[in-house]
Image (cartoon, rainbow, N blue to C red):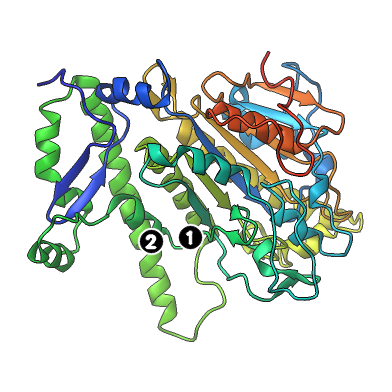
């Protein structure tokens, strides 16, 4: 049985629980048929940060392969050969004719289509985002069409920036002009959605018994896991053990976050009860596991909502991010922004390193993905939408040649999104308000 082929949709079952599996070598033939001849699955991920970037500390020196990491980009050193820094791209659809550039830029972040401004903030209209175009085309390939995650909650009611709807500032993923894809901000809910779904064939007694025990999902599928291992070769067994370890470690971390939140809730309701440092890493781990299991091929993560004024006290800062972003060329504000930007890049680097650690045949999960890093603005003080801070990580299965710094002269980010969609087999000739074709120079 060791050499028998497995379907990529194989699940472990036990006591009313279902658990997805990582991509195993014995699944490769069926996965290749789904993704194309000889191909592993291709994924798209988005990592959004709010309030722009302090650009003097961002832009690298040198171009092509002869480039050096800037102070803000230093955390990317372990994955320098896996990233493309793209300078000079514009995002003009995000520009507002009013004063709400954070909301307008965030609402248009992935659609490259100008959002609707009106005196009635309940009247929302935006463009369909790049991730949702991919999700719609790939939805038959995975259990979840897409995964939308974030650190900060909040609904879409009211005005969040000038008279722009909060729906624009709090969402980057849009399935339709009036349909933002609400992000999940509870790590435990994300984990349950991905890995702890209930078996529809389970009996009521099995479900109740499972609820009665505070055990790992691994305990409930252990019998099925033992049977599966008898069918696997040595490399797949090792990969399965590594996957089980990752799931268990993540379970414990999610449970710790949940317990901390409950303890805080016993007193007066706090304004903020979660540690953004740990929560961000857990969300990154959840994205990696979702890709690793081929539960979805499209994911977005918002480190904060548009115009976030989070106080990064653990960085020794006492004011909010948005206030610092209006730096007025003050040296102290520049120094504060440099700390925030570098910390954000450390989180992005963590995600990329986790993706690079997952082997998929001769390549890695990162090799088979494209991961877009960006913000709604360039400089937060001037509310600029030209020369945006953009990093594209991964190889997209060969669609991109990373390890370089490429300078453009005002080409729209929409053209980059056309190229990213093409990497997952979704062909579009135009995109958003200003996308006219694939972005050149992504591949040597």
- Viewer-proximal residue among 120 and 314: 120
Report which residue position mark 2 lands on. Answer: 189
SS of the residue under disc 2: helix
What is the residue that sits farthest to the bottom in this orientation? 268
User: What residue is drawn where x is 80% and y is 48%?
Assistant: 93
Nearest to the observer: residue 385 or residue 319: 385
State the image coordinates of residue 109 (x, y, percent, origin top left): 70, 49
Sequence-wise first label, 1 or 2: 1
Residue 339 placement (x, y as % from top left): 71, 50
Is the residue under label 2 in contact with that under label 1 (CB below 8 Å)?
yes
Q: Label 1 belongs to which residue?
A: 184
Residue 23 falls in image quadrant: top left
Q: Where residue 293 appears, x then y in whole percent? A: 34, 38
Residue 358 visible here: yes
Q: Residue furthest top?
A: 444
Q: Is 329 drawn above or below residue 414 in the view shown?
A: below
Q: Is residue 430 left or right of residue 351?
A: right
Q: Locate residue 57: give its quadrant.
A: top right
Residue sitting at 65 percent across and 28 percent down? 419
One can see residue 73 in this view: no
Q: Residue at the spot x=42%, y=58% of the render? A: 187
Q: CA distance from mark 1 to mark 2?
A: 8 Å
């Amino acid at each position: 049985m060791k050499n028998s082929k497995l379907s990529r949709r194989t699940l472990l079952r036990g006591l009313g629980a279902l658990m997805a599996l990582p991509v195993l070598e014995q699944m490769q033939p069926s996965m290749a048929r789904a993704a194309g001849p000889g191909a592993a699955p291709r994924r798209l991920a988005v990592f959004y940060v709010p309030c722009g970037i302090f650009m003097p500390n961002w832009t690298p020196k040198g171009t092509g392969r002869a480039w050096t990491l800037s102070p803000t980009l230093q955390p990317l050193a372990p994955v320098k050969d896996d990233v493309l820094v793209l300078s000079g791209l514009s995002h003009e659809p995000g520009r507002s004719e009013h004063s709400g550039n954070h909301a307008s830029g965030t609402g248009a972040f992935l659609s490259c289509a100008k959002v609707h401004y009106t005196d009635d903030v309940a009247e929302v209209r935006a463009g369909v985002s790049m991730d949702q175009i991919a999700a719609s085309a790939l939805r038959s390939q995975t259990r979840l069409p897409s995964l939308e995650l974030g650190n900060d909650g909040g609904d879409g009611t009211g005005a969040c920036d000038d008279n722009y709807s909060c729906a624009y500032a709090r969402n980057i993923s849009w399935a339709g002009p009036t349909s933002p894809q609400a992000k999940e901000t509870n790590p435990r809910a994300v984990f349950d959605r991905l890995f702890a779904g209930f078996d529809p064939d389970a009996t009521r007694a099995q479900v109740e018994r499972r609820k009665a025990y505070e055990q790992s999902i691994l305990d409930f599928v252990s019998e099925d896991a033992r049977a599966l291992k008898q069918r696997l070769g040595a490399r797949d067994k090792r990969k399965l053990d590594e996957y089980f370890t990752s799931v268990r470690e993540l379970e414990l971390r999610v449970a710790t976050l949940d317990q901390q939140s409950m303890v805080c809730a016993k007193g007066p309701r706090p304004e903020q009860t979660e540690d953004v440092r740990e929560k961000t890493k857990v969300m990154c781990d959840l994205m990696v596991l979702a890709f690793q299991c081929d539960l979805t091929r499209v994911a977005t993560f918002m480190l904060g909502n548009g115009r976030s004024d989070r106080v990064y006290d653990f960085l020794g800062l006492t004011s909010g991010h948005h206030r610092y972003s209006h730096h007025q060329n003050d040296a102290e504000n520049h120094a504060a922004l440099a700390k925030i930007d570098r910390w954000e890049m450390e989180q992005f680097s963590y995600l990329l390193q986790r993706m690079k650690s997952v082997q998929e045949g001769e390549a890695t999960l990162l090799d088979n993905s494209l991961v877009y890093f960006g913000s709604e603005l360039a400089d937060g003080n001037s509310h600029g939408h030209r020369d945006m801070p953009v990093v594209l990580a991964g190889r997209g299965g060969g669609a991109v040649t990373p390890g370089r710094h490429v300078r453009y002269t005002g080409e729209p980010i929409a053209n980059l999104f056309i190229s990213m969609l093409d990497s997952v087999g979704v062909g579009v000739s135009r995109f958003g308000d200003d996308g006219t074709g694939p972005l050149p120079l992504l591949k040597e």
